[in-house]
Amino acid sequence: MKKLIAPIALAVALSLTGCGGTATTPASAVDSKAAEEAPKAPELTGAWKQSNSASEKSYQRATIAGDKITVEWVTDAGDTTSTYWVGTFKAPNDASEPYKWTSKRDAAATKSALLASTDDTKEFTYEGDTISYKVSMLGTTKKVKLKKN
């Protein structure tokens, strides 16, 4: 009987020792979980349309491609477009908001556009899935808000 009790006691002792320790997670599992949970920088490339226009027939739209942003006036329900801004774009590196960038105007691309801004730079802000910037014309300034199409 003593020969049978010793192996059982040893097995119970080993199992209890395992219960008292702390569980560890392999470093690779922790790293992959952190990578899954880390917020990603927003993807701003693509087409954007003004969300705060008073009319569906007249608004601004923007296209971000590579390191360039182009903004156009759209009228006649889309039949007429006019260049407002062509400038630089720098994508965000992280998910922190608001994300702001200063776009430098491409003077060659806007010099013959009658409705284009003549500002050398324009401040853009991305926050809450919206890009915003100020537009001034004829003594009136409006904050334009764009949503991604």
Image (spheres, helix red, strand yellow):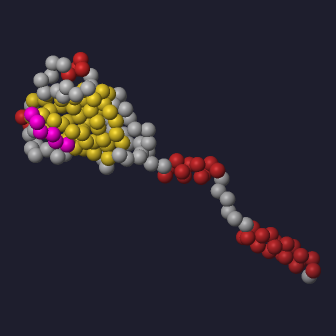
Q: Nearer the viewer, residue 84 or 44?
A: 84
Q: Which residues lie in the magenta part?
A: 138-143
- Asked if one can make out residue 149 in the rendered structure from this viewpoint, the answer is no
**Residue with the most extreme left position:** 76
Left or right for 74, reference 6: left
Residue at 33% x, 31% y is 89
The quarter holding residue 88 reads top left
Residue at 24% x, 29% y is 70
Residue 52, given in percent of the width and then of the height, sits at 17, 46
Q: Nearer the viewer, residue 146 or 135?
A: 135
Residue 136, given in percent of the width and then of the height, sits at 16, 35
Residue 106, given in percent of the width and then of the height, sits at 27, 22
Q: Nearer the viewer, residue 64 or 127?
A: 127
Specify the quadrant that holds the N terminus: bottom right
Left or right for 89, reference 59: right
Residue 73, given in percent of the width and then of the height, sits at 14, 33
